Amino acid sequence: MNLDFEEHIIDVVNHASKELGDTLDVSTLRWVGRPATKGDVMDASQAFYVDGKRRSDDVVLLLSNESFGHTVAEDVARARAVAGRVDQTLRSHIIKPVYEGRVGNQTYALFSRLNPLSDYRIVRFLQKARASTRVAAWLTKLAQQTRKVSQEEAEYERLFLKPLESLAGDDDINPRIKAFARQSLEHIRKARPDLITIAQHGDFWSGNVLFERRFLGDFNPFLGRFSVIDWRGLWLDGYPGIDLVRFCLSIYKVGASRNNQLMSDYRAALDLSPHELRVYITIALGRLGQELDQFPKDRYCIMCDRIFGFAETHLIEH
């Protein structure tokens, strides 16, 4: 970090600390991980740890990069948008900042420090079993509470037909995916079934589900309350299934029996067949391809292969 940039960040932390009641130890400012590099998503925000004067005051600072100064403000605004659509029980698991602001053209927010799943293999194994059930149940309720039937012609075309057209015509995509997209498109055009949208997080993996901090948390298999972070990819008119698939991919291997149970419970709650859920997941992939923005195309194609492969394995008609 160069000196000018460091001083710039210190000014942000000093200001936020004063607004919070002089709770932060500015000398502890440090990167979370490493700065973004050329291979990362171009509009990725920068993240820093800042310790509090008490452990309960520890925070993470998110600061948008200078080229995309709106990103953190968008994250916070979209989290609030989905929180406004659900009941208090679901809302309590949506992260909210303890402080937010703007410096120059950059936006920033401070969040209470939370813990990821443990890095210790045995502890992580036990945590995953507990977390997967709780998080999948939360995703199911999120889908139920934000479910909406889309029937208006222009919206139907935009939300369901155009994404499949885009995917079916993308020469960079796996031919199996293109073929399924084409078949689904033909069926929907002909049958015109009632199709639904739900609130879709857009980047739902285990790293974006964090847990309240506990003493010796890395060694504790019992997880506290969880919070879902990083809402900038939110679509309030998104699609069932894909958030749960991405979460499962981040904690279990493809083919694991636990995935079958989680997907089955989700489908039953939404009254969807395996084939219907595969179609929604494919539509979601097509729409993401239309709206890649700063997301690298090669990473998108790899993600499509993983998600579609999971759906082929775990969403089979019996």
Image (spheres, rainbow, N blue to C red):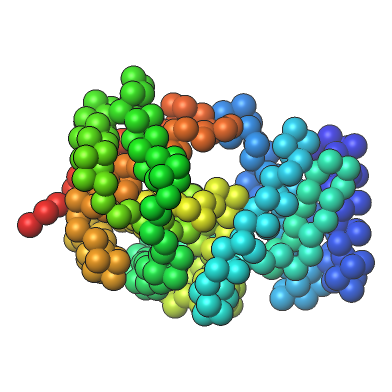
Q: Is residue 171 visible?
A: yes
> What residue appears at the point 48 percent right and 50 percent down from the top-left corner?
202
**Residue sitting nearer the eye, 309 or 212:** 309
The quarter of the displayed image where residue 29 is located: bottom right
Q: In the displayed image of the protein, which residue is found farthest to the top?
A: 171
Rendered location of residue 184, percent (x, y): 23, 39
Left or right of 287: which side holds 187?
A: left
Give the total of numbered labels.
0
- In the displayed structure, 208 sits above or below 279; it is below
Rendered location of residue 35, percent (x, y): 68, 39
Q: In the displayed image of the protein, which residue is found farthest to the left?
A: 318
Q: Is residue 139 visible?
A: no
Q: Quadrant of the C terminus?
A: bottom left
Q: In the displayed image of the protein, which residue is found farthest to the front?
A: 153
- In the displayed structure, 84 sits above or below 254; it is below
Rendered location of residue 242, percent (x, y): 37, 51
**Residue sitting nearer the eye, 161 or 10:** 161
> What residue appears at the point 22 percent right and 35 percent down from the top-left corner?
186
Rendered location of residue 172, percent (x, y): 36, 22
Q: Quadrant of the N terminus?
A: top right
Left or right of 52: which side holds 234?
A: left
> What residue appears at the point 38 percent right and 29 percent down from the top-left corner?
166
> What residue appears at the point 63 percent right and 32 percent down from the top-left corner?
42
